[in-house]
Amino acid sequence: MGKFKIRLNVFTGLFLGMFILIALNSCGVFKKSSKKKTAVQMQHTVKPVAKSDSLGISRPKPFKDIIPSKIKGLKGLFTVYQVGEKYYFEIPDSLFGRDILVVTRYSKNAAGTFEYAGEEVNEQSIRWEKGPLNKIFLRAVLNVTSADSTNEIFKSVEASSVNPIIGAFDIKALKKDSLGVVIEVTDFLKGDNVLTGYDPQRKKKFGITSLIADRSYISSIKSYPVNTEVRTVKTYNVSPNPETLKFPAGNEIGVTTMELNSSFVLLPKIPMEKRLYDPRVGYFASYVQKFGDDQQKVENELFIHRWRLEPKPEDWDKWKKGELVEPAKPIVYYLDPATPKKWRPYLIAGINEWQKAFEKIGFKNAIVGKEWPENDTTMSLEDARYSVVRYLASPISNAYGPNVADPRSGEILESHIGWFHNVIQLVHDWYMIQAGAIDPRTHKMVFDDELMGKLLQFVIAHEVGHTLGLRHNMGSSSLTPVEKLRDNAWLEKNGFCPSIMDYARFNYVAQPEDKISEAGIFPRIGDYDCWAIRWGYTPITETKDQVAESKILNKWIIDSLKNNPRLWFGGEGFGSDPRAQTEDIGDNSMKASEYGIKNLKRIITELPKWSYEENDKYDNLQDLYGSLISQFSQYMGHVIRNIGGVYTTYKSIEQPGDIYSPTPKNIQKEAMSFLDKQLFQTPEWLLNKEILNKIYSTENPDYLERIQLNVLSSLLSSQRLLRMSITANRFSPIDTYSPLEFMEDLKGYIWTELKTHKEINYQRRNLQKRYLSFVFNLLSAPPANVNSQATALSPYMRIDYAKVSDVTSVARSVLAELRSEITAALPAISDKISKSHLQDVLASINLALNPKG
């Protein structure tokens, strides 16, 4: 019976399939045309067919049967019709095959998620496509690979890059002039999909399980010439975290509701010319894999994000002559009407500060900050045509500046800067702790509006830089000699950092006797920022060819850096280059941090007075002391990066010298000496009992112990020691700091009492035991044959190379030396607790070196 049944189904299917093909052919769908068309043209000009409902094919109805004559459509990118509770899009033929970017943001969101109205949820490029059997398909466009359509390899790229279909719609009616179609979009827009809803990652983050359909609906749809705005309310079930049995974000009701705004934005028919990325200039970038017939290797084509900025057609000649002209389309940022009025002038000033960078390349009023026209009902804060500084009611102390770019070209289309309300506390504490010793305006818990306004102005200028396409330049601050940070005349002319895109907050090096003005304390848009804008935005009219243009830009970089080394881009600060760090300033971390600590010693004694507010329960003092400790900890981190550091200076082949070189040995030794003086020798000034006894219990380790623990953990990490081992092997021993020499120096600083025979105090005893625990960790290497067997079995199994290198040998050698030194020193130690401590340490070392006894 089973076999017979299968054969019957196959036969029936073949017969029915032939019948449908014959029927479709009779309507002309597969008939040959005398006029040749490309595959793409045929795809987009195929006419929908009307067949019998008995065949399961949807039949388009007359327009008036779907859209009553009394219903007026909202004309725009899509003409939108609302018929009762149903929504229809009228899609003209001209939009089929066009790239459309969909950006979804919160317009309202639930409390406790730490995501706020105005923030982006997702973005995706799409295309409408006519399919068979009266279907309209919606495809997600994945911009991963590219090839010129005139190349033969284009056929292979196209065949291997099929975009996924994320929606299918029946054609409900033909447009009145038959140059478009009408589809119903109600269920899709209000439903659960990654285009207008939550992606899987966000669902997991918030514990969202499923959409509740009867509590989800379309709130409104508005349509404009190049965009259609869809606002939906969506309600989801929420489940508790299985590990904690708690609902995410404090939601114990089991459901969450938010309002989302999805902007369908038509991308330019002809994408803007790309500008190819260069690692020597800090721009955000996108990339595609590029294939071509003449290649001998596949290329990753990287191109930067930038706004389309060019003169008006009638002003090109003026611009070429060097006259200032206004751009055809200026960059405009609106302030959220939720922004407190007293801060608005400062935020606008921070936006407009970038005008000077664009003036240097011939554009005036290229970027403008404006207040939101609150009485204009045609404008929406979520509308993707407008760039907005969204003011977010949040306890988060931060701000961020994203940009939305055309994935095909890198053209920035809009930006919604996220401005968290509590960024005010962040800059207040930063400025008091970093500049409190040199600016008396900081000596109170509530700054004057003028001072706070200027602090916010610098923050918004930094975030706007990101929205212009600029990445962080953490290396910029290292280009200023430390002593120049105390020279007021030099600072007023040059600023203390060449780039506002660095995390160089304020001039913490300047001392009270230097009499530094505000211009030398605050960051500002500097030489690098103006130069980066010139490199990224100057129209190059000599050529339209990307490769030829990149050669011109390469020469700009070489010549500019030769003439002004302050234009160096040091990267985001994620690597091991000590010149590129966050929160630091100056060309020598040790000297800069020593000046910073001098100021912290001045500030700590004043904190009880500066933090005073009536009826305060020492919350202010606790916050400010925590900020001071954090600043001190950052100084330690800046110094540590020099030990085992590797300088990275990206170059083109025309530039002399290496890209990678070790941090000079003398600087690394200087860093070790600094750590001994400022941290290993107990900094008693930090343990201010007048403060600690009011804010901190004795139940937990104090702040200083935590800092020492973190420093030792970083210094004695296997990754750092492995890097030092490799560096010592590659470069000259004279120029490098070997792991053995480093470990012996560190041992000497940690165990000085073995030579002086002095009492080992509480902090030092804890420091020494922590040191031992990290060195012991370096000994736990698996047998060599274990790793070789694992490698033979699978090349993907993780190997800890640090534990099969010199690192383990060095650690064992240092412990053996320490054991000998402790044994020799013990008879001369008279303090009872110190002697007990050393005897305990000795036993631990013996066990570590000989675990089997």
Image (cartoon, helix red, strand yellow):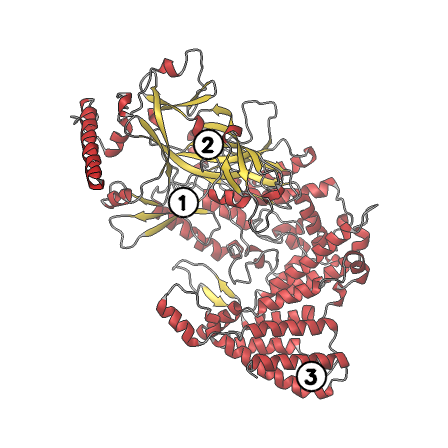
Looking at the image, residue 390 sits to the left or right of residue 124; the answer is right
Q: What element does badge 2 sit on? A: loop
* Snapshot quadrant of residue 305: top left
Give the residue at x 64% y 82%. Answer: 842
- Nearer the camera: disc 1 or disc 2: 2
Number of other residues with Cα within 10 Å of mark 2, as a class: few under 14, some 14 to 19, many 20 or more: many
Q: CA distance from mark 3 to mark 1?
A: 63 Å
Earlier-in-chain disc, 3 versus 2: 2
The C terminus appears in which quarter of the rendering? bottom right
Q: Check disc 1 and report the residue beneath it.
A: 275
Q: Position of residue 6 (x, y in %)?
A: 22, 39
Earlier-in-chain disc, 1 versus 2: 2
- Viewer-side residue, 548 vs 316: 548
Name the residue furthest front. Answer: 1
Q: Is residue 844 visible?
A: yes
- Viewer-side residue, 118 vs 508: 118
Looking at the image, residue 10 sits to the left or right of residue 273; the answer is left
Q: What element does badge 1 sit on? A: loop
The answer to whether 425 is drawn above or below residue 327 in the figure is below
The answer to whether 613 is drawn above or below residue 812 in the figure is above
Is there CB contact under 8 Å for labels 3 and 1? no
Type of the residue with mark 1: Arg
Q: Check disc 3 and report the residue beneath it.
A: 755
Give the residue at x 53% y 66%. Answer: 645
